[in-house]
Image (spheres, helix red, strand yellow):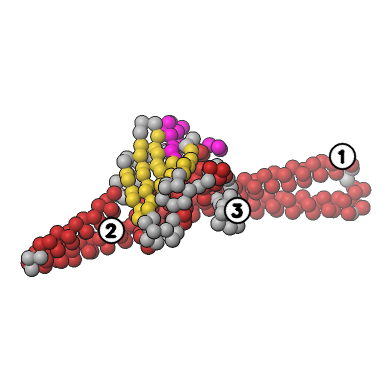
Amino acid sequence: MKAQPQFNMKKAAVYSVVINAFQILAMLALAIYVFTDEFNHVLQDSLGDILILMLTVVVIWGAVVDIREAVKTGRMHVQLHGLDETVTQMTDMNHALRAQRHDFLNHLQVVYSLMEMEEFSEAQQYISQVYGNIQDLSRQLKTACAPVNALLRAKTTEAEGKHIRLFVDVKAAWKDLPLPAWEMCRVLSNLIDNAMDALAGKKDAAITVTLKEDVRSFSFSVANNGPMIAAEAAEKIFEAGFSGKGEGRGMGLHICRKTLRQYEGDLSVSSTETETVFSGYVPKQNMINGGKPHDP
């Protein structure tokens, strides 16, 4: 994957100071030219025109540079936010792994005690429960992408707290994704969050996250057994600002689709009375171009 150009905050600050200083000096010069009769007499009309032209060029140049640096700063802020979320998720996963390691000895002691007491059926039931919990975690650690693993673990824990069953079906390693891991995590996180919102208060609520891969692309789906999305809203939900949750919402799905399309992928939805599935993909051939995004 091609490395993204680094943003030099110090250089941007120097540019901003120098350019704005030029603007101030040029504006002062123009003020003197316009409002001082004596200065007007010294300068000829042609020289005054040149001064105005220089001022215009400086102001436009400064505005362009300021806008460019502002855009870079905005992109950097989004990236830092995504990286911060990834670090938090990986920290949560690390805590979960450490907790399981700490509990392992306790589990062995319980099983040993039950065996000593010849409570074999109880021991078998206890082992089955512990084994099931370990299998749930193992299914979330099958990808070669640590941030994705961390996200799935964090979302599983969050879903449990909301009494939602979250199943993870990993059918591929997801190695060498053509987009930064934090961007893929943002897509999956938004989709899982939306699914949990749709299932709020529902009995037997369940979400299934499936990760797949073939020779052409990396693909995924996030399915839930929540309410059906009406056919007329199926495309509108991807529009910026479209939401039934009130003002200030409705950007998540728009960002998900926009992110995937920047890497020549896409996101779609299918919904019935029993299941709603968001399906997305990113083509592998994009890696030939160094994983560089393009404007959709």
Mark number displayed over residue 46: 1
Q: Amino acid at mark 3?
A: Ala
In this rendering, position of residue 261 left or right of residue 161: right
Q: In the image, which is nearer the foreground, mark 2 or mark 3?
A: 2
Q: CA distance from mark 2 to mark 3?
A: 43 Å
Instruction: Tell me if I can see residue 232 in this picture.
Output: yes
Q: Amino acid at mark 2?
A: Leu
Give percent across and percent down for residue 26.
77, 50
* The stretch drawn in magenta includes residue 295: yes
Residues in magenta?
280-296
Q: Are marks 1 and 3 in contact (CB under 8 Å)?
A: no
Dividing the picture into quadrants, the one containing residue 110 is: bottom left
> Which residue is under mark 3?
13
> Which residue is under mark 2?
97
Q: Quadrant of the C terminus?
A: top right
Residue sitting nearer the eye, 159 or 101: 159
Residue positioned 81% across, 44% down in the render? 52
Q: Mark 1 or mark 3, which has the lower sequence index?
A: 3
Q: CA distance from mark 1 to mark 3?
A: 35 Å
Q: In the image, which is nearer the foreground, mark 1 or mark 3?
A: 3
Under tag 3, what secondary structure? helix
Q: Mark 2 or mark 1, which has the lower sequence index?
A: 1
